[in-house]
Amino acid sequence: MPLATDRLHAEQAFHDRQAGLRTATFQIQPSALHVDVDSYLDHESWMRPAFAQLGDLSGRAVLDYGCGHGMAAVTLAKLGARVTAFDLSAGYLREARRRSDANSVSINFTQADGDRLPFANGSFDRVWGNAILHHLDLSRASRELHRVLRPGGIAVFCEPWGENPLLNLARRHLRYPGKERTRDEQPLRRGDLAVLRKSFSHVETHGHQLLSMVRRVLRPVRLVRTLDSCDARLLTHLPFLHQFCRYMVLTLRR
């Protein structure tokens, strides 16, 4: 238990600092709190197809699982969902509430740990999470996730993937924007899928950013678009290449 408590405190402190760094920006430029749905869904290549896995959200009870800055929660609400969002970080929750208010949407926020959810059994039709499972004790988190999801419900998670040895080398040694990480987080791997399958009989995976992962260090738009197009063809015709992608979209069905 002390190790788990230390991990939680370290995660909470890290994300509180991350949220605090953006506070001054919103004071100077409050328009930065506005969320444009199309821009958000297109800011990473996996986002729009991942959201599509959720289906029609109108009137559905949706949990934003580790909501962070609240952009996904606002997007879910704008798409018609009844949104509940939680995060471990009080700093992130303050930012998410400000973003909710700035976008005139109603979201129920609460502070919680993904390993111990304060929600009743079968509370949600859908669960969304972006870069969250790899921070958690996956065995405990998957049981909690299964518990709060209704029969027939769907959970979709976008997670960094760790089966590409060259990518793992780059993660350790290259400098690039947004590299900041907590000390305990590790990209998901195939063994983690086996853990998820103990709670969910249906676990679907789809990799994103194979060649186009170079966007982390190279920014020419034309090059990235060309590589995205190459990825689409390669991943369609050579499915085994999904395991070497930068990110994996996981669809879990209860």
Image (cartoon, rainbow, N blue to C red):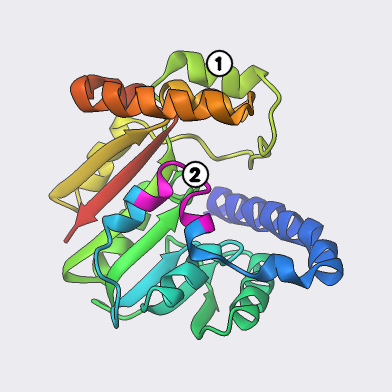
Of marks 1 and 2, the one in the foreground: 2
Residue with the mark numbered 2: 44
Q: Nearer the viewer, residue 69 or 75?
A: 75
Q: Amino acid at mark 1?
A: Leu
Give the secondary structure at mark 1.
helix
- Image location (x, y in percent) of residue 26: 79, 68
Q: Nearer the viewer, residue 239 or 151?
A: 239
- Residue at 22% in and 28% down: 236
- Residue at 49% in and 13% down: 166
Residue 242: image quadrant is top left
Numbered-mark total: 2
Determine crowd level at label 2: few under 14, some 14-19, many 20+ residues with C-alpha closer than 10 A.
few
Q: Nearer the viewer, residue 211 or 204?
A: 211
Q: Amino acid at mark 2?
A: Glu
- Image location (x, y in percent) of residue 78: 45, 75
Q: Quadrant of the C terminus?
A: bottom left
Q: Nearer the viewer, residue 45 or 84?
A: 45
Span colored in magenta: 39-48
- Image location (x, y in percent) of residue 157: 37, 51
Asked if residue 247 can be seen in this view, the reply is: yes
| Residue 236's disc number | none
